[in-house]
Amino acid sequence: MATVNIFKNYQNFEEFPAGHVIFQEGQPGDLMYVVKEGEVDIFIHGQHIETVGPGGVVGEMALIDHSARSATAIAKTACQLVPLDEERFKIFVHQIPFFSLQVMRVMADRLRHMNMHLNYLNFAQMRGDVDALI
């Protein structure tokens, strides 16, 4: 993802070893992270949802809507993450419109993925109901 180019030379990052829990579902969140190097696994209710690589973002929902974390993020590999608090996020959105577009794309992709998953679950439920009638 091209977002990594924005942060390629950025020196304010945190390092996490493989297996480290970056944040947990249900925790309050006041930071989002841009993956500078490495990979981060995202889990919801213990189910693996996606792996986020360089240029990807994690934790954006809690930062934007001031809600608890909706997922758990665990470093899949050793990684470098650029933390952004709300103030810094707003600065990047204002100064680099491309950044906000990338964050919106990530959120749209995740919403689309969840919609497909819900459609699958609804279909499976309907099929189970039909099978029970037969």
Image (cartoon, grey):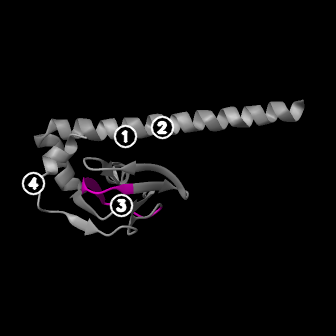
* Observer able to see residue 70: no
Q: Give the mark nearest the N terminus, 4 or 3.
A: 4
Q: Earlier in the sequence, mark 1 or mark 4?
A: 4
Expressed as whole percent of the image width and height from the top left, the position of residue 39 reads 33, 55
Residue 82 image-quadrant placement = bottom left
Vertical relation: 126 (above or below) 19:
above
Q: Marks 4/3: CA distance?
A: 26 Å
Q: Position of residue 111 (x, y in %)?
A: 44, 37
Q: Which residue is mark 2?
A: 113
Q: Residue at x 48, y 37 (%)?
A: 113
Q: Nearer the viewer, mark 3 or mark 1?
A: 1
Q: Which residues are magenta?
A: 26-40
Q: Residues within 10 Å of mark 4 (few under 14, many from 20)?
A: few
Q: Mark 2 or mark 1, which is nearer the start of the sequence?
A: 1
Neighbours of disc 3 within 10 Å: few (<14), some (14-19), many (20+): many
Q: Which residue is mark 3?
A: 29
Q: Amino acid at mark 4?
A: Asn
- Name the residue type under label 2: His
The amino acid pointed to by label 3 is Gly
- Report if the CB atoms under discs 3 and 1 are less than 8 Å apart: no
Q: Is residue 36 magenta?
A: yes
Left or right of 92, for residue 52: right
